Image (cartoon, rainbow, N blue to C red):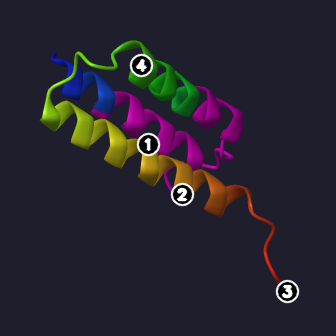
């Protein structure tokens, strides 16, 4: 597995935790998803200056999408 594969795997896990399979009866695990997002943020800090342009693009895109999904899932619904 390469670095991009690791990033995608972590992002997939976070996405699944926020939106479990329909019909599984599993509630969203937002704390778990937030932990994985935080891990990706730490990886971004610790690998600064050593990533390829593709790795930068993938990491920035995944973090953006996960953050937006997290905010969407935690925002109170308007009546």
Q: In this view, does 31 lie to the left or right of 39?
A: right
Q: Which residue is drawn at 49% across and 37% down?
A: 14
**Residue on which the image places disc 2:** 68
Mark 4 or mark 1, which is nearer the start of the sequence? Answer: 4
Any mark on residue 63, and which? 1
Q: In this view, does 77 lie above or below 56?
A: below
Q: Is mark 1 on a helix, strand or loop?
A: helix
**25 in magenta:** yes
- Mark earlier in primary sequence (1, 3): 1
Circle 3/circle 4 CB separation < 8 Å: no
Res 23 seen here: no
* Residue 32 in sight in this render: yes
Task: Please state if 30 lies on the left or on the right of 3 as rendered.
Answer: right
Range shown magenta: 8-35
Secondary structure, mark 2, is helix
Q: What element carries label 4?
A: helix
In what element is the residue under mark 3?
A: loop
Q: Name the residue under label 4.
A: 43
| Dominant SS in magenta | helix
Which residue is identified by label 3?
79
Whether residues under marks 4 and 2 lie with C-beta atoms below 8 angstroms apart, the answer is: no
For the C terminus, which image quadrant? bottom right
- The residue shown at (61%, 51%) is 70
Q: Nearer the viewer, residue 47 or 4?
A: 47
Q: How far is mark 4 from mark 2, CA to CA?
A: 19 Å
The earlier-in-sequence mark between 3 and 4 is 4
Residue at 65 percent across and 57 percent down: it is 71
């Amino acid at each position: 597995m390469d670095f991009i594969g690791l990033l995608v795997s972590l992002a997939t896990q976070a996405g699944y935790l926020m939106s479990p399979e329909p019909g599984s009866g599993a509630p969203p695990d937002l704390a778990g998803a937030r932990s994985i997002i935080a891990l990706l943020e730490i990886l971004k800090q610790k690998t600064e200056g050593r990533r390829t342009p593709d790795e930068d693009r993938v990491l920035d895109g995944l973090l953006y999408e996960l953050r937006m999904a997290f905010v969407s899932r935690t925002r109170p619904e308007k009546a």
